[in-house]
Image: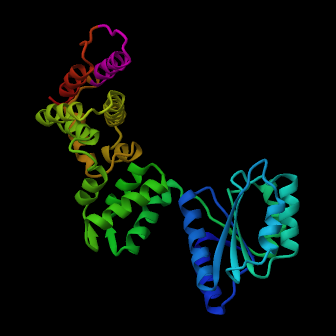
Amino acid sequence: MQTKGDGLPALLARAERDRTMPPLITVSSDEALLALEAQDAIRSTARSLGYSEREVLNTDARFDWSRLAQATQGMSLFAERRIVDVRVPTGKPGVAGAAALEALSQSPPEDSLVLLSLPRLDRKTRETRWASALAHAGLWVDIDAVDRARLPQWIGQRLARQQQRASADALEFIAERVEGNLLAAHQEIAKLALLYPAGELTVDQVRDAVLNVARYDIFQLQAAMIGGDAARVAKTMSGLRAEGEAIPLVVWAISEELRTLARVKSQVDAGRPFSMAARENRVWSPRDRLFERAIGRVEADRIEHALARIAGVDRLAKGLRARQADSDPWLELTDLALDIAN
């Protein structure tokens, strides 16, 4: 039997109700978080049905596949039922492994649950005899990746599990910061549960929780520079330096914001509506308000000049000489950021 990841909870609920588990369950996914959660749910259901012992088999090129038969056929002295976790991180069990898995599929264990963990298989591997045999003999769970377009919705569903909700802008902000990393998203969602009670989360609360990892951070610096707050630029830059922030990270933050500003300004100057230019360059609310004011305040040649100076700062940070640049990269960064803010 085959199912997608979202169909697994219903199948496990039925298994618990009927007091029986499939002898073979295969979880196939490239999403580490989702695969781990699915495996945890399967093991939890199995434990509730008396599978009280567990053995883990981590396979590699030198793994002795006879251990699989020993694990599934040997009776335990301490438990009536056992879970045998078989992990094939490459998705390629080899000739011996393929034969062992095919044999297991033809004669599934009576008192053991074999939980096989695989990465997402390509079509050719999926059609091999051993993979087909596993799918026919037990339950095969395919867990798809969460693409960027669906990530805000996924975050919203995870927030709902902890009785929290947030606006589309707040969900998009989290999605933008985690860059498709579900483990990072999971950590941020858990942090929100610790910081705020159940109910509606504001955009400001989400921003503070996601970005508040230090007294000063590079995202505050970006906002101050684009927003024209020179005093805050100087204060934040001083704080970053005092806290030992890495120069390359600050260089990246400033240069990325300047390049985005240059693209938005170029499109608006060419006649494209600001809202469209902002959306195409992933400038979301409330950051878009800062950009809308900045494109009318900062000339294109100032942005180009600042980007040229950034290259010099990068050389200084690496211990190289840069023409027409201060010998202190922090002073040079502060000066060019203030030039954009003023």
x, y percent for residue 132: 83, 66
Residue at image x 64%, y 60%?
A: 29
Up the image or down, 176 lies above or below 260; here it is below
Up the image or down, 256 lies above or below 181; here it is above
x, y percent for residue 55: 68, 67
Of the 4 image quadrants, the one containing the N terminus is bottom right
Up the image or down, 184 lies above or below 28; here it is above
Magenta-tinted stretch: 303-323
Is 186 left or right of 71, judged from the image as shown?
left
Residue at image x 33%, y 50%?
A: 284
Magenta segment's dominant SS is helix
Up the image or down, 221 lies above or below 288; here it is above
x, y percent for residue 204: 23, 57
* Residue lying farthest to the front in this orientation: 77
Tally of marks: 0
Is 240 left or right of 66, judged from the image as shown?
left
* Residue lying farthest to the bottom in this orientation: 18
Q: Nearer the viewer, residue 119 or 199?
A: 119
x, y percent for residue 38: 58, 69
State which quadrant residue 294 falls in: top left
Q: Nearer the viewer, residue 168 or 92?
A: 92
Residue at image x 78%, y 53%?
A: 63
In this picture the colour scheme is rainbow
Residue at image x 26%, y 38%?
A: 222
Q: Nearer the viewer, residue 33 or 156?
A: 33
State which quadrant residue 47 falls in: bottom right
Of the 4 image quadrants, the one containing the C terminus is top left
* Residue lying farthest to the left in this orientation: 231
Q: Nearer the viewer, residue 144 or 279?
A: 144
Q: Is residue 320 magenta?
A: yes
